[in-house]
Image: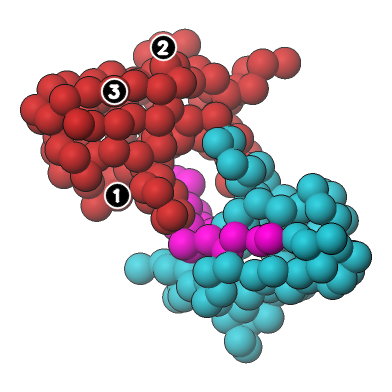
């Protein structure tokens, strides 16, 4: 069974500082990996996804993530955080092949301070 | 191009009652997935519909059922509501022929069971 762990429940960073959100997954083969963002009271927006190929994936809003198979990780990064990045971030994993069942982590809430 | 729409936005029900939530997928999409997001948690996969059939199901009891119509829209039904069913219910649509897992989420329906 596939699973996702986001070890940081809450992270606070200063505006302009760099950001890294951690994600570890469990899956028997090469997974599909995703990062979503959710603002308060909103649905989920896809930031980026990894299916295959280059292990460094670029997404929207200046985010990137790196797939490290040896560490079963898919950490999200941003070099300079903006106040508007404050939101909850979810890492998710999907199985290749078959129908598109996606398993989400419990999320990391990002607070940005001036 | 309309995105994923869900109705109603908010709903208050009493224990034991039944509820129906509705979802219209993004134009051109043929697959609808439903997720339950409890407060402070990540979305949990309920089930997925494609070609008017349930294709995959998560760990939810039979009180949760669904339907997909020929126009690809979908309903989620929950019978015998429990307090623990209070959550944000998210609908996501995708195109199964594109095995890219690019799911677009609606804003959700907030269900409160009293």
Measured Cα–Cα span from mark 3 to mark 1: 24 Å
Residue B87 visible (yes or no): yes
The answer to which image quadrant residue B105 occupies is top right
The answer to which image quadrant residue A113 occupies is bottom right
Q: Is residue A106 magenta?
A: yes
Residue at 23%, 32% in the rendered image: B113
Percent position of residue B6, x then y: 48, 21
* Visual hue assigned to chain B: red
Q: Which residue is the site of mark 1?
A: B58
Q: Secondary structure at mark 1?
A: loop
**Mark 3 or mark 2, which has the lower sequence index?**
3
Q: Secondary structure at mark 3?
A: strand
Q: Which mark is residue B12?
A: 3
Percent position of residue B91, x then y: 46, 32
Measured Cα–Cα span from mark 3 to mark 2: 29 Å
Q: Is residue B81 magenta?
A: no
* Magenta part of the chain: A92-111
Residue at 68%, 80% in the rendered image: A68
Q: Judge depth for marks 3 and 1 and give the one in front.
A: 3
Front-lying residue, A56 or B86: B86
Residue at 82%, 68% in the rendered image: A14
């Amino acid at each position: 069974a596939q699973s996702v762990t986001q070890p940081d429940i809450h992270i606070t960073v200063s505006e302009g500082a760099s950001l890294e959100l951690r994600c570890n997954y469990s899956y028997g083969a090469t997974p599909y990996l995703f990062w979503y963002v959710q603002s308060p009271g909103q649905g989920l927006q896809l930031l980026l996804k990894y299916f295959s190929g280059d292990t460094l994936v670029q997404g929207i809003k200046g985010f990137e993530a790196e797939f490290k198979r040896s560490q079963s990780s898919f950490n999200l990064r941003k070099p300079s955080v903006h106040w508007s990045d404050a939101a909850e971030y979810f890492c998710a994993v999907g199985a290749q092949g078959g129908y598109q069942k996606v398993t989400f982590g419990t999320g990391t809430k990002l607070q940005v301070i001036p | 191009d309309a995105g994923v729409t869900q109705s109603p936005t908010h709903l208050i029900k009493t224990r034991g009652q039944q509820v129906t939530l509705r979802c219209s997928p993004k134009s051109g999409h043929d697959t609808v997935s439903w997720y339950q997001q409890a407060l402070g948690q990540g979305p949990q996969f309920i089930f997925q519909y494609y070609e008017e059939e349930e294709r995959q199901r998560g760990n939810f009891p039979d009180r949760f059922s669904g339907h997909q119509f020929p126009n690809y829209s979908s309903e989620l039904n929950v019978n015998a509501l429990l307090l623990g069913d209070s959550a944000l219910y998210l609908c996501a649509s995708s195109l199964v022929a594109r095995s890219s897992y690019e799911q677009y989420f609606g804003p959700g329906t907030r269900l409160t069971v009293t």
